[in-house]
């Protein structure tokens, strides 16, 4: 037998679920122009236990790792990964974070750093008297000093068994967790890893139409659950007012 | 009088059960692979109605020495039967195909036609139409709840390292063009009889899959929930109205009962 509290809880879980979904969609839309951004999807699952109905639960937030479009910038240290893998950057606390955002620049010590000053994980420094810099498809960094090209070593890429399990820590960075598994290091163009495209940035993979459709459906699901709550309240009122 | 009161209350209780079901279906409007639950109602138990006429004759007075015979005192006549309301009957899952939704995720799968994905849960093997899969930290294919997807040999599917996952319409997985294994797509001859709804968007089978699978697997798609919003809203209106009617019946009977008590009290 069902009870009023149970029904109200069910409607409540669904309403709160729609609101969390709206948060995810809003965050995706807000990052429609963020370099290397990957959209997220909130997965809902039915909550049914031995035929007791509890509505719905949020089971996971999944990152969608489809490739973003190429945005050519002409800047030699703007690099993007086509295919699988992440760049590693060393954060201020010494831990490694992983990102798809390849907008790097040189700092005064000859290190390659991201927008927040985190160093790209890579063995080597760029000689300060270099005049030209290039990154090729295999991630090899080349620099021209007095007209002579030197190889400075390849940029490593990192891949995970379950990239969706990486924890998003903001600033377009992710860190490893138990769910993601250990990072597997490789070089660009290796089996299972993507290759490097220089002078380009990876656009956000957020698809405006998909997000808009998701927004419409979540709005409708929200409306239906609100209606459900109102009607259940109406029924509760009737039960209470049975005796005049 | 009292019997009528119980019938009306039974309609209110069933109304509440129906409302719970509608709310559950509504909450799962966006749950991929969800099959809406339908409820049927049945008549509650019937009771016999009897008339008891007294055949007590004036000649039998106190002190009379007559052997006991209840038939001499009361004659019970069966008049007919009387319903005592409504009760919820079996719940059934509506197994129609949901619309396919394009997601372009390599491990989002949908089955077009009949068939179910087989997943291993802590409670045993379950069948589902929910095709949201992912790789876990050991590169095993798992559902959103972390349960293992089974291949046609009833083994967990673990993908070797590689990048491009392709799954064709019969469920064969290719990793970088190399065949890995085939996903189990199980079908049942009589789905309604074989499948019982289990926890969290899955079904438990009472028989081994015995049907010929005609379903095809679509990679990059999800099957949306088959909850019909228009039907849902109609049901909601009808539930609230029938609840209201039952509530009115209870009120009226209560009023009548009260009136007869006060009238009788006056006599």
Image: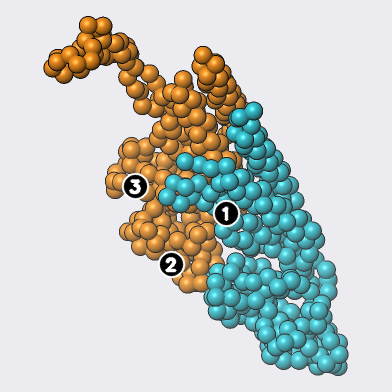
As measured in the structure, the alpha-carbon distance from the residue carrying label 3 to the one carrying label 2 is 25 Å
Give the colour of chain B.
orange
Same-chain status of marks 1 and 2: no
Toward which corner of the image does residue B214 lie, by quadrant?
top left
Chain of the residue under label 3: B
Q: Percent position (x, y) of residue A212? A: 73, 47
Q: How many marks?
A: 3
How many C-alpha atoms fall within 10 Å of the one at disc 3: few (<14), some, or many (≥20)? some
Toward which corner of the image does residue A221 lie, by quadrant?
top right
Q: Mark 1 points at which residue?
A: A57
Task: Point out which mark residue B205 bears.
Answer: 3
Mark 1: which secondary structure?
Answer: strand
- From this viewpoint, is residue A47 visible? yes
Q: In this view, does B203 lie to the left or right of B105?
A: left
Chain of the residue under label 2: B
Q: Name the residue under label 2.
A: B158
How many C-alpha atoms fall within 10 Å of the one at disc 2: few (<14), some, or many (≥20)? some
How many C-alpha atoms fall within 10 Å of the one at disc 1: few (<14), some, or many (≥20)? many
Camera-side mark, 3 or 1: 1
Give the vertical position of A111 relative to B176 (above or below): below
**Residue placed most toward the observer, B53 or B126:** B53
Q: Percent position (x, y) of residue A239? A: 59, 33
Residue displayed at 43% across by 67% down: B158
Q: Which chain is cyan?
A: A
């Amino acid at each position: 037998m069902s009870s009023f509290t149970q029904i109200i809880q069910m409607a409540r879980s669904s309403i709160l679920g729609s609101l969390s979904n709206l948060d995810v969609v809003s965050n995706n839309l807000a990052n429609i122009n963020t370099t290397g951004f990957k959209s997220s999807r909130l997965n809902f699952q039915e909550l049914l236990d031995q035929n007791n109905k509890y509505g719905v639960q949020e089971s996971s937030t999944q990152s969608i790792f489809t490739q973003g479009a190429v945005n050519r910038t002409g800047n030699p240290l703007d690099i993007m990964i086509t295919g699988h893998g992440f760049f590693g950057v060393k954060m201020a606390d010494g831990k490694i974070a992983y990102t798809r955002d390849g907008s790097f620049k040189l700092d005064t010590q000859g290190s390659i750093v991201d927008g927040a000053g985190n160093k790209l994980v890579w063995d080597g420094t760029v000689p300060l008297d270099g005049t030209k810099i290039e990154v090729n498809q295999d991630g090899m960094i080349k620099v021209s000093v007095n007209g002579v090209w030197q190889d400075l070593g390849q940029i490593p890429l990192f891949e995970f068994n379950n990239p969706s399990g990486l924890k998003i820590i903001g600033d377009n960075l992710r860190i490893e967790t138990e769910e993601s598994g250990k990072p597997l290091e490789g070089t660009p163009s290796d089996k299972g890893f993507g290759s490097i495209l220089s002078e380009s940035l990876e656009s956000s993979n957020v698809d405006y139409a998909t997000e808009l459709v998701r927004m419409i459906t979540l709005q409708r699901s929200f409306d239906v659950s609100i209606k459900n709550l109102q009607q259940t309240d109406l029924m509760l009122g009737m039960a209470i007012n049975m005796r005049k | 009088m009292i019997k009528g009161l119980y019938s009306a209350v039974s309609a209110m209780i069933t109304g509440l059960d129906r409302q719970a079901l509608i709310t559950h279906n509504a909450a799962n409007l966006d749950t991929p692979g969800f099959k809406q639950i339908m409820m049927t109602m049945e008549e509650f138990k019937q009771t016999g109605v009897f008339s008891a006429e007294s055949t007590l004759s004036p000649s039998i007075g106190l002190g009379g020495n007559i052997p006991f015979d209840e038939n001499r005192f009361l004659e019970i006549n069966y008049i007919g039967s009387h319903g005592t309301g409504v009760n919820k009957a079996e719940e059934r899952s509506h197994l129609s195909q949901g619309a396919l939704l394009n997601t372009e995720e390599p491990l989002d799968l949908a089955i077009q036609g009949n068939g179910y994905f087989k997943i291993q849960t802590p409670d045993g093997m379950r069948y589902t139409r929910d095709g949201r899969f992912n790789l876990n930290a050991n590169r095993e294919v798992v559902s959103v709840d972390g349960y293992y997807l089974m291949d046609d040999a009833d083994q967990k599917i673990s993908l070797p390292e590689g990048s491009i996952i392709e799954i064709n319409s019969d469920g064969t997985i290719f990793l970088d063009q190399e065949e890995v294994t085939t996903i189990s797509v199980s079908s049942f001859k009589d789905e309604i009889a074989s499948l019982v709804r289990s926890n969290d968007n899955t079904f438990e089978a009472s028989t081994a899959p015995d049907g010929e699978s005609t379903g095809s697997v679509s990679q990059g798609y999800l099957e949306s929930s088959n909850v019909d919003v228009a039907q849902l809203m109609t049901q909601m209106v009808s539930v609230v109205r029938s609840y209201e009617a039952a509530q009115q019946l209870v009120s009226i009977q209560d009023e009548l009962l009260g009136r007869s008590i006060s009238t009788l009290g006056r006599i």
